[in-house]
Image (spheres, rainbow, N blue to C red):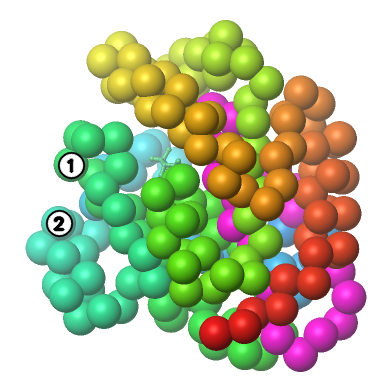
Amino acid sequence: MSEQQQGKLVILSGPAGSGKSTVVRQLLDKYPGRLELSVSATTRKPRSGEVDGVAYHFLTVDQFLQKREAGEFLESFEVFGLGNWYGTLQSEVENRIQNGISVLLEIDVEGAMQVVEQYPQAVTIFLDPGSLEVLEQRLRGRKTETESVIQRRLEVAHEEMEMAPRYKYQVINNKLEHAVEQICQIISNDPGEIVR
Ligand code: 5GP
């Protein structure tokens, strides 16, 4: 990533189980102080080990909707049709970008498209899990979700993978190191200047 005055806005999407979280951790390690993760807000319940303010800002539905009314979100969306809201707070993004720090958003496809309307130069990357079979194995391996949630997530994953062509870049996560390397090159090479 070259030095520049404004940070880049990098959006990484991909179905749950595509390996996004691991890729994100590795990217953040590669660019300390220069690429930071936007901590999303959500109304879903924390999974075990998830810390408020680190994994997400965990909010009640009322709190979330109040912030939404107040225009505090860059984008917000009810994901999975199970009543869970997710959203990117403006406060996670704008100051950093103005101060030359790039911001990584790990958000769903609908949210990504909302952000692109406001930040057309965002560097959008879709992480493809390779195959739905691999995805199913990863989701089951987590052992954190009920069968009906897994089934619903697989359906959503299928729908999401059809949206991949709407991203500037598509990266297949067959091998973690390769995927991370490819994404680093994309982040470095895309001018990503924010034109508002
Ligand atoms: P999980 O519940 O597994 O943490 O996340 C579920 C989905 O919500 C993932 O696809 C993730 O990318 C998406 N997501 C997380 N944060 C946000 C956000 O701020 N906005 C939107 N639109 N989606 C998000």
Where residue 26 appears, x then y in whole percent? 75, 48
193 or 12, which is in the foreground? 193
The local crowd at label 1, few if under 14, some if 14 to 19, many if 20 or more residues have their Cα within 10 Å, is few
The magenta span reads 1-27
Secondary element at image label 2: helix
- Earlier in the chain: of badge 1 and badge 2, it is 2
6 or 149, which is in the foreground? 6
Residue at 34% x, 15% y: name it.
151
* Residue that mark 2 sits on: 61
* Residue that mark 1 sits on: 83
Can the viewer see residue 22 in this picture? no
Three-letter amino acid code at the position of disc 1: Gly
Is residue 8 covered in magenta?
yes
Where residue 172 appears, x then y in whole percent? 73, 30
Where residue 115 appears, x then y in whole percent? 47, 65
Q: Are marks 1 and 2 in contact (CB under 8 Å)?
A: yes
**Which residue is farthest left?**
62
Where residue 85 appears, x then y in whole percent? 26, 51
Q: Nearer the viewer, mark 1 or mark 2?
A: 1
Is residue 89 covered in magenta?
no
Residue at 62% x, 66% y: name it.
122
Three-letter amino acid code at the position of disc 2: Val
The local crowd at label 2, few if under 14, some if 14 to 19, many if 20 or more residues have their Cα within 10 Å, is some
The answer as to whether callout 1 falls within 8 Å of ligand 1 is no
Quadrant for residue 195, please give it. Answer: bottom right
Residue at 67% x, 61% y: name it.
123
Quadrant for residue 20, please give it. Answer: top right
User: Image height check: is 121 above or below 76?
Assistant: below
Can the viewer see residue 150 in this picture? yes
**Which residue is farthest front?**
165
Q: CA distance from mark 1 to mark 2?
A: 9 Å
